[in-house]
Image (spheres, rainbow, N blue to C red):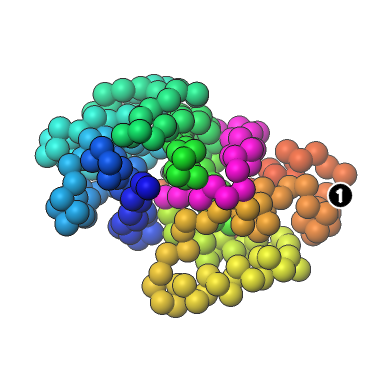
Amino acid sequence: MLDIQQIPVLNDNYIYLIHDPDSGATAVVDPAVAEPVLERLRQNNWQLNYIFNTHHHADHTGANLALKNKTACQIIAAENDRQRIPGIDQGVAEGDRLKLGAYNIQVIECPGHTTGHIAFYIPDADALFCGDTLFAIGCGRLFEGTAEQMLQSLKKFTTLPLRTKIYCAHEYTAANAQFALSVEANNTDLLDAIERIKQLRANNLPTVPTTLEQEIATNPFLRADSDAIRKTLGMQNASELAVFTEIRARKNRF
Ligand code: ZN
Ligand code: FE
C-alpha cells in the first residue's frame, strides 16, 4: 500500500508525500515550501526521488529548486509549461505513464486554472492529485483557461471510479460549501457535508481528501445539469456550459 502523507503549509495549501514502502520510492506533489517537506522526509527516513508539479504557480513550485539541491530529485511537470516550471527535468503530457515503484501513475491534462495544468492519477491507490482544478465542493479560478476548458477537465475526472480519492491542493472547503448552498440550498448531501466540515474544521482537521462520489453529489461545478441549480439561476433550458460559466462567475463575486 502506498503511504500518502498530507502536509498543511502556508495559509491553506496541502503538500503531499507519496511513498512506496516496497521500493522505497518517494515523490512530493506541489512543494510550496521546502523545510516542512525535508522535515517529514527525515522523520520517515525517506529519500526524495521525484517532485510532481500540477502547475506553475509559486504555491505549488516554490520549493522545487531547494528540494532538488538538497535531494537531487527529478522534477516532473507539464511539457507545455517547461518555461514556467523551475528546474523541470521531465516534461509530460496527456496519457503519459510514470512509475513510483510498481505503481503506475497516469498524467491527465486539465487546463482551466492555468493552460498547462495537469493531474496525477494512481489507479491502484484510487488517488487523484489534481492541484487547483477540482477542490472539495469547488473548482479552481480561471486564471488562464476558459470555462469550457475547465468544464471538460472536470468531466475527465468524473469518468474515474467513484471511490477515487481527490487530493486537492487547498483547504477551501468551508467557504466553497457556503457558496454551494447559495445555488443549491436543499441538497441534503451538501447539508450533511456542511455538518461534517464544521466538525472537522472545529478540530483543526483537514476536509481533504474527499471522494469523487462525494463531489458528484455536492460540488456545484460537477452539477451544472442539476434542476435545482438551474432553477436558482433561472437557466432551466441553458446549455451545460452556460450554466457552468454562470456558477463560476457567481463564485467569483461571492
Ligand atoms: Zn494555482
Ligand atoms: Fe494554488
Q: Residue at x 35, y 51 (%)?
A: 4
Snapshot quadrant of residue 71:
top left
Left or right of 231 on screen, residue 215: left
Give the extent of the magenta segment: 145-169
Relative image position of residue 173 (x, y in whole percent): 52, 61
Relative image position of residue 119 (x, y in whole percent): 46, 36
User: Disc 1 marks which residue?
Assistant: 236
Using the image as rendered, state which of residue 220 and residue 114 is in the foreground. Answer: 220
Q: Is residue 55 above or below residue 1?
A: above
Q: Residue at x 27, y 30 (%)?
A: 75
Snapshot quadrant of residue 68:
top left
Left or right of 125 on screen, residue 146: right
Q: Residues within 10 Å of mark 1 (few under 14, many from 20)?
A: some
Relative image position of residue 84 (x, y in whole percent): 33, 28
Residue at the right extreme of this rendering: 237
Residue at the left extreme of this rendering: 70
Left or right of 146 on screen, residue 239: right
If the image is split into quadrants, where does the C terminus sit?
A: bottom right
Q: The residue under label 1 is which amino acid type?
A: Gln
Relative image position of residue 122 (x, y in whole percent): 45, 38
Q: Residue at x 37, y 47 (%)?
A: 1
Snapshot quadrant of residue 175:
bottom right
| Residue 248 falls inside the magenta stretch | no
Q: Helix, strand, or loop for circle 1?
A: loop
Residue 62 in view (yes/no)? no
| Residue 163 falls inside the magenta stretch | yes
